[in-house]
Amino acid sequence: MAILITGGAGFIGSHAAVEFLNAGYDIVVVDNYCNSSPISLERVKKITGKDFPYYEVDLCDKAALEAVFVKHPEIDSAIHFAGLKAVGESVEKPGLYYSNNLLSTLNLVELMSKYDAKKIVFSSSATVYGVPKTVPISEDFPLSTTNPYGETKLMIERILKDIWVSDHEWSVSILRYFNPIGAHKSGMIGENPRGIPNNLLPYVAKVASGKLPYLSVFGNDYDTKDGTGVRDYIHVVDLAKAHVKALERAMAVKGVDYFNIGTGTGYSVLEIVKAYEKATGLTVNYKIVDRRPGDVATCYADPKKAYEVLGWRAENNIEDMCVDLANWMKQNPNGYEEE
């Protein structure tokens, strides 16, 4: 019995690998390293003191992926992280996102079916809720998207549901993440964005360290406590632990279910800036600029279902997230350098 972790060298995947190993599971990791590094997997081994196989495989290469299933007949389930994930890039290159994210998933589930490994936890996103009319957001909200990245997540959710409809032996847990931040408390693994970060906290950290001149705050006239946008941020280790709980559910029951993975608390952009400054003693320079089209004032999860069904809840607060991210940045100012 082993778990296939796709995209396991990435930010969330590497943290999930740690949690599955710590929980006593055997894992097999595949990743094409297009936005990650095998160094993270070597560090996972150091953190856990456990060995595991990993392979450079692009899920769009079906033959290469099948070779992993053939070599590891013990694989009976998958945690599916692999996929392109930059919203802005998806708007610029929609064809790339549709072809990569959908084909990779179709190849994966076809092989899982062939090799009788019909349990999957899928890495979805709160982007499938589009622009919600109210908060907090619960799993029964209407679904819509505002960009090709979000559309691929929603399409994959539908693909997985249809696969279960056609074969009730499947068990599918779909986790809709809010905003993962932070890093492992060891400082050995963390987010390693190439180029300019797409997400708020890595950008804040780079401004604080002097690598970027200032943070652009998009609008300060929203109907929020300080006028800046409010979002739900979750520690990546809490998020990783949710996958362990979701796989436990998949092993116990068949069917499809959906879970919001967030804290249920919203923090504004300026609250995040102040929390990071407090955690590090550094200054985060920022400028107020015009709103971005499509941004909403407030977006945060109702995570009640994840607690009631999975027995999971977030344990880390915003200070923990900032302290752990700062520790990662201090130890790895250039991310994963070649070793």
Image: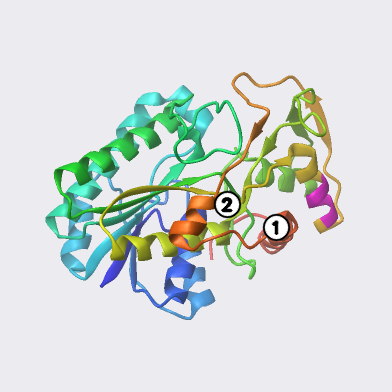
Local SS, label 2: loop
User: Which circle marks residue 317 in the picture?
Assistant: 1
Q: Is 82 positioned to the left or the right of 330 in the image?
A: left
What amino acid type should be assigned to the residue bearing mark 1? Asn
Q: Was residue 276 drawn as part of the magenta stretch in this picture?
A: yes
Give the Cα separation between the discs numbered 2 and 1.
22 Å
Q: Quadrant of the C terminus?
A: bottom right
Task: Give the residue drawn at x 47%, y 23%.
Answer: 92
Task: Give the residue drawn at x 74%, y 60%.
Answer: 323
Task: Give the residue drawn at x 40%, y 50%.
Answer: 81
Residue 160 point in image, percent of width and height: 27, 43
In primary-sequence order, the first of circles 2 and 1 is 2
Residue bounds of the magenta highlight: 274-278
Q: Was residue 67 drawn as part of the magenta stretch in this picture?
A: no
Q: Is 195 positioned to the left or the right of 30 in the image?
A: right
Residue 316 point in image, percent of width and height: 66, 61
User: Which circle marks residue 276 in the picture?
Assistant: none
Is the residue 261 above or below the residue 84 in the image? Answer: below
Residue 289 point in image, percent of width and height: 77, 23
Local SS, label 1: loop
User: Which circle marks residue 192 in the picture?
Assistant: 2
Which SS does the magenta portion mostly show?
helix
What amino acid type should be assigned to the residue bearing mark 2? Asn
Residue 133 point in image, percent of width and height: 57, 25
Q: Quadrant of the N terminus?
A: bottom left
Is residue 38 among the parts visible in the rendering? no
Q: Quadrant of residue 135?
A: top right
Pick the residue in front: 67 or 170.
170
